[in-house]
Amino acid sequence: PGSHEALIARADLNEREGKFGKALVDLDTLVKALPGVDQLRQRRGVTRFFNGDMKGSIEDFDAYLENNPAREPHHWQRGLAYYYAGEFAKGVAQFEIHQDVNSNDVENAVWHFLCVNRIKGFEAAQKSLIDIKGDGRVPMAQVQRLFAGDLEPKDVLDAANAGDPSPDDLRNRLCYAHLYLGLYFEAKGAPKKSLEHIRKSAIDYAMPHYMGEVSRVHLRARTK
């Protein structure tokens, strides 16, 4: 048990430093040593995703959910992995069931949109955009209206910069704003403009949370 705790601690440290490949060495050892600990499969699935291994990430998430089926509607992380793996129909299904348990999340609506866009095109995605009310995070209301066709990209940035947020709050707002502007321009078929925003989210306004890491996953995936 002591050695297992040491491996987890080292994996944590490597992940905080963005060394996901090194973290996976220890997580692989732990999964083999403790095959009955479902949470390790979930944990490794996240780390594999951050390391760009979408197939491996989905395999781990599936293994976790096989023994924890009640968590399936909550598993938006698998939806993101489906998007980057090119499994867009599965992504649509995942984000639709997530809506049942998280009904006021603009991000879920956007990722559903992005998957539909890859299957049916931008206009069809816009028509099927899930209507979200009550997401109070700035600038999520404006992101929703951008994808609905009611606002322009500048409006999202104006909202992110509005008021008197603390430096950390402003950085977080801009991390999200540029991530979703990057995804918007990718959906519109403007990869150069998309990457301009993704770089700002991933680097200029980098944040150490899950979606901040998604920006870096996206940047690496699109600049291989």
Image (cartoon, rainbow, N blue to C red):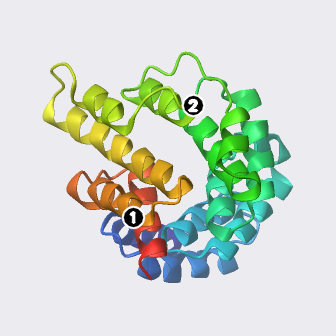
Q: Which residue sits at x=66%, y=28%?
A: 102
Which of marks 2 and 1 precedes in the sequence? Answer: 2
Residue 42 % position (x, y) = 65, 59
Asked whether the viewer can see residue 7, the reply is no
- Is residue 152 in sight in this rendering? yes
Q: Is residue 137 above or below residue 123?
A: above
Q: Disc 2 marks which residue?
A: 148
**Where 159 falls versus 171 (above or below)?**
above
Residue 156 position, x and y percent, is 35, 33
Q: Quadrant of residue 106?
A: top right
Residue type, numbered disc 1: Arg
Q: CA distance from mark 1 to mark 2?
A: 26 Å
Q: Residue at x 67, y 33 (%)?
A: 129
Q: Element under label 2?
A: helix
Q: Which mark is residue 23?
A: none
Say which of 141 and 38 sits in front. 141
Q: Position of residue 71 (x, y in %)?
A: 76, 43
Quick one: 37 or 103, which is closer to the camera?
Answer: 103
- Is the residue marked by circle 1 packed among few (<14), some (14-19), or many (20+) residues within 10 Å? many
Quadrant of image for the N terminus? bottom right
Residue at 53% across / 32% down in the picture? 149
Q: Residue at x 74, y 72 (%)?
A: 35
x and y percentages locating residue 5 in the rendered image: 48, 67
Mark sitting on residue 216: 1
Name the residue type under label 2: Ala
Q: Residues within 10 Å of mark 2 (few under 14, many from 20)?
A: some
